[in-house]
Image (cartoon, rainbow, N blue to C red):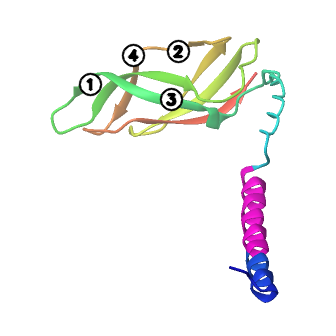
């Protein structure tokens, strides 16, 4: 069986076409997968630690002060005397100064706002306990921090 030249050319052309398609797919697979050898791992850069923030004088908004009513005496049909203690919490993000400073606040919810203050030295607050306040029955006492001075 003898092939004529025309059939042989068509067969070789078909083989060449198949080889080109297969080669193109192979090359595309190598390019997509990132090459034949794995890429070198990126070098890890050492982490640098940031210097801690410097201590600074806090602002009034950096304090959350709660009122804890420790006793309540009410007159029938009249006003009440509340005994309370405050619980200050520093909620700022920077360290407190080493030198003492004073936080001024007012307790509201009684008959009149009652001013108060506490001193902070390092991480300790010096507060008064069982402070008396006149107010209506079922008063809701709250604190507004007014100022911080050092």
Magenta span: 15-33
Mark 2 and mark 3 lie on one chain; the one further toward the N terminus is 3
Residue 52: percent from left, percent from top: 78, 21
Q: Quadrant of residue 17?
A: bottom right
**CB within 8 Å, label 3 to label 4:** no
**Under tag 4, what secondary structure?**
loop
Per the rendering, the mark at residue 127 is 2
Mark 3 and mark 4 lie on one chain; the one further toward the N terminus is 3
Magenta stretch encompasses residue 49: no
The residue positioned 76% from the left and 21% from the top of the image is 150
- In the picture, measured across the screen, residue 55 lies left or right of residue 127, that is right
Most extreme residue toward the bottom, as rendered?
6
Pair 2/3: label in front:
3
Above or below — where is 115 with respect to 109?
A: above
For label 3, the crowd category at 10 Å Cα-Cα, with few meaning under 14, some 14 to 19 and many 20 or more, is: some
Most extreme residue toward the front, as rendered?
1
Mark 1 and mark 2 lie on one chain; the one further toward the N terminus is 1
For label 1, the crowd category at 10 Å Cα-Cα, with few meaning under 14, some 14 to 19 and many 20 or more, is: some
Judge by depth and name the residue closer to the eye, 55 or 4. 4
Q: Which residue is mark 1?
A: 72
Instruction: Classify the position of the N terminus by image quarter.
Output: bottom right
Above or below — where is 98 with respect to 27?
A: above
The residue positioned 80% from the left and 25% from the top of the image is 47
Magenta stretch encompasses residue 20: yes
Per the rendering, the mark at residue 130 is 4
The residue positioned 79% from the left and 40% from the top of the image is 37
Q: Which residue is mark 3?
A: 65
**CB within 8 Å, label 1 to label 2:** no
**Under tag 1, what secondary structure?**
strand
Residue 118: percent from left, percent from top: 59, 19
């Amino acid at each position: 069986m003898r092939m004529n030249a025309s059939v042989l050319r068509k067969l070789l052309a078909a083989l060449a076409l198949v080889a080109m398609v297969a080669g193109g797919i192979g090359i595309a697979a190598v390019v997509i997968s990132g090459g034949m050898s794995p890429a070198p791992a990126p070098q890890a850069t050492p982490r640098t630690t940031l210097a801690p923030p410097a201590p600074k004088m806090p602002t009034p908004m950096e304090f959350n002060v709660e009122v804890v009513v420790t006793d309540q005496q009410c007159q029938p049909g009249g006003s009440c005397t509340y005994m309370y203690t405050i619980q200050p919490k520093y909620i700022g993000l920077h360290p407190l100064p080493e030198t003492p400073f004073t936080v001024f606040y007012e307790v509201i919810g009684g008959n009149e706002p009652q001013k108060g203050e506490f001193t902070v030295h390092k991480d300790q607050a010096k507060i008064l306990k069982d402070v008396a306040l006149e107010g209506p029955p079922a008063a809701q006492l709250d604190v507004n921090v007014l100022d911080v001075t050092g």
